[in-house]
Image (tube, grey):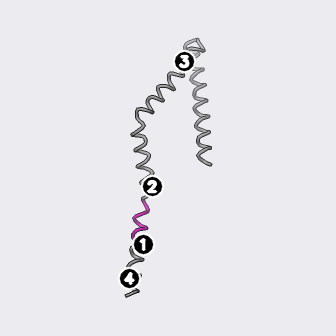
């Protein structure tokens, strides 16, 4: 549920960023259509750049997630191993 909220906020941010760029470029070029095309070009350039570096972004996030999810596994394995040793010692 929280991810939908984050997605909505990100979408709203990019929409407002697009309108802000449109107005800024329109005032610089004195043409609303020119500002719209220039804004579309900026977003297309960002999309192409994101597409070009997608593997490094995915690898960075996956390594972060793996590290976060497995950082406490070493402690859990040690505790399980100690419990097995105690059971063997008591059973003998």
Q: Residue tagged by mark 3?
A: 37
Foreground residue among 32 and 24:
32
- Label 1: state its secondary structure: helix
From the viewer's perspective, is the residue at label 3 or at label 4 nearer? Answer: 4
Stretch of the chain drawn in magenta: 71-78
Reading the chain from its start, which is encountered first: label 4 or label 2? 2
Task: Residue 72: say if magenta.
Answer: yes
Residue 18, placed above or below residue 88: above
Reading the chain from its start, which is encountered first: label 1 or label 3? 3
Q: CA distance from mark 1 to mark 3?
A: 62 Å
Instruction: Give how far across and how far down residue 13 sits, in percent.
Output: 59, 34
Task: Residue 61: say if magenta.
Answer: no
From the viewer's perspective, is the residue at label 2 or at label 1 nearer? Answer: 1
Instruction: Give how far across and how far down residue 43 sits, in percent.
Output: 51, 26
The answer to whether the residues at label 2 and label 1 have Cβ atoms under 8 Å apart is no
Q: Residue furthest top?
A: 30
């Amino acid at each position: 549920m929280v991810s939908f909220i984050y997605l909505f906020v990100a979408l709203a941010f990019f929409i407002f960023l697009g309108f802000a760029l449109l107005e800024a470029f329109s005032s610089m070029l004195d043409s609303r259509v020119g500002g719209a095309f220039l804004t579309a070009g900026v977003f297309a350039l960002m999309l192409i750049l994101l597409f070009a570096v997608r593997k490094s972004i995915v690898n960075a996030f996956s390594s972060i997630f793996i590290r976060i999810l497995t950082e406490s596994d070493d402690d859990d394995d040690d505790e399980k191993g100690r419990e097995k040793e105690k059971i063997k010692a008591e059973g003998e």
